[in-house]
Amino acid sequence: MASPANFETASSFVVAPQPQMKFWQRATFRKKVVPWLFVLPILLINIAVVLGPAISAIYYSMTEWTGIGEAKWIGLENYRRLLFHDDAFRHAFRNNLLWLLMFLTVPIALALIAASLLSQIKRGAIVYRLGLFLPYVLPSVVVAAIWRSLLNPDRGITAKLSDWGVPGMDKAFLGNGSTVLPTIAFVDNWHFWGFLMVLFLASMQNIPPELYEAARLDGASKWQEFRDITIPGIRPTLVFMILMTSIWSFLTFDYIWVLTQGGPAGASEVLSVLVFKNAFMNLEAGYASAIGLSMSFFVGIVIAIFIFLRKRGWEI
Amino acid sequence: MAATTTPTPEPNSSRRRGGRTGLGIIPNYVVLTLLAIFALGPLVILAFNSLKGKAEIGSNPLGFPKSFLWSNYPDAWKVGNFSTTLQNSGILVGITVVGVIVLGGMAAYSLAKLNLPGANIVTLYLLIGSSLPIQLFLVPLFFLWQKLGLVNSLPGLAIIYIAINAPLAIFLLRSYMVQLPADFEDAARIDGANEWQIFSQVIVPLSWPGFLTVGLVVALSVWNEFLLATVFLTDQSKFTVVTSYYNFTSRFSRDWGMTSAAAMMMIVPIIVIFLALQRRFIEGMTQGGLKG
């Protein structure tokens, strides 16, 4: 990488470019080129893997392309098809929105409650924190397999609950078009919410305890403390995680693919599943690129909304 | 994006919200214990089931096993082809971690210490690059890799992992290196060391905790990765632990004892390493919001 030569000079600050010096010994080389040599390898790899293909995806999205042969230019035809003629796309997009709704409510509420309770205790706090975080480090295929057995309509935990007389539990939750998506979201959440909880907890621990003492002297209730001190105190983290959760909701893939591959009969398909199916099963790589691009567009919209709100003076 | 910086959670925080002591704290423990049962109960059931035979699973699918059928483990090891898949996953993790640490560390050093001309542009590029969805570039990338003969190649997939994991690693390492006092590098420079020697012999040893954190988080994310491994490794001899398990569970979906044993073999090492180094893991995973 950088020149292995040992420099005779005392330090780079006093090097004056002298005619007999080799080019790598010159100060401009050390100051301008060497720093670039350190970033170039990773930058080139990143461009080859991410930026190059991302840009060519824009081109391919306007072609008919199986992925193997030549791509045939068809202009905006793919987008026309996607917007006006593809029920699967519309349905998948609606599922992404439902997913977004579910992930912006349940895990965030659960994580806020748990973090708030956990921030008030001392004994055993570390054990609870680790235990609640643990599912987050497990691979999706294992989490999916565990819950597939627990949700088995014959011998899972839902069957047990049904035996005990809990109503509505005698279903094949993953095999039923009306319950499949919330069920997968539930499984994904089981693995995900502990991560949010740890982030919120870390943020809550930075709130000065004096604020709570003052509130208590004023006779504030627990709810008032939570609403007026805890939530404002962790707002930057909270808003950032709402942003990230929104973005991830448009990209979700693993749990849906592993649990149902989008089934039954497409009921749990989301956009990323459509990309996968079109590109690698239907030989419609051009159309898949168009769907991939539309996903990035939705992510872009989410980010734009946050930037807009910040510009409007929301402190986020 | 300024809100990215999340303070390191202190494992034994002395800053508790005082006052609510004594009996008033009991409801907290009750709720938290219920949540802990929700989080860990499924794993306990998995451990139970990994020791049951087919017949017992049918009669007792959730409870403690009546007799321990340890042979599920060697069976799952053999049928699940763990000796191959563990090696594949190990190679992927190894190449990726080394690549991210060396190449990402170099870039972080340049950004933190070398006054890289155009550093803002590089940072902006990495920020945008790391937030592009995989699905955007996945399709052209796959067919490009196919042309280059890098599909079904472990190093080929590792290159992708390196590219994707590098930006976060660079940000983490850079923030670590910026805090190092300049005295050490200056001394080395006066002694005639060049930039590479300063990086490898001064900066890396001084910022090893940052490197350890990055290495652990990258290793875990590569170990668990599913989408890219499914797409880029279609040959069974190249399957990772995760993609092989996915096939395994669909082939042996009725044999819960064996699939549970296979799952246990996959997650117990992760859990042990996670618990042993939990501070570093949580620090690394919560800084910058790793992809969930």
Image: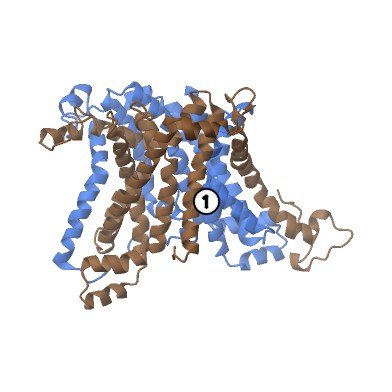
Chain colours: A brown, B blue
* A65 to A105, vertically: above or below: above
Question: Farthest residue toward the left?
Answer: A165
Residue closer to the observer: B223 or B1: B1
Where residue B200 sits: x, y (%)? 62, 53
* A117 to A57, vertically: above or below: below
Q: State left or right for residue B9 relative to residue A119.
A: right
Residue that badge 1 annotates: B168
Quarter occupied by residue A254? top left
Which chain letter goes with mark 1?
B
Q: Local crowd at mark 1 within 10 Å, few (<14), some, or many (≥20)?
A: many
Who's the residue at 75% across and 64% down the image?
Answer: A12
Quarter occupied by residue B149? top right
Residue closer to the observer: B134 or B197: B134
Who's the residue at 22% across and 72% down the image?
Answer: A220
Residue flagged by tag 1: what amino acid is it?
Answer: Leu
Where residue B292 sits: x, y (%)? 41, 45
Q: State left or right for residue A186 relative to residue A249.
A: left
Who's the residue at 32% across and 44% down the image?
Answer: A189
Where residue A144 sits: x, y (%)? 33, 34
From where the camera sits, is residue B136 visible?
yes
Where residue A56 sits: x, y (%)? 62, 36
Q: In this figure, what is the number of numbered marks?
A: 1
Residue closer to the observer: A42 or B56: A42
Q: Secondary structure at mark 1?
A: helix
* B176 to A106, vertically: above or below: below
Question: Farthest residue toward the front?
Answer: A84
Quadrant containing the C terminus of chain A in the rendered view: bottom left
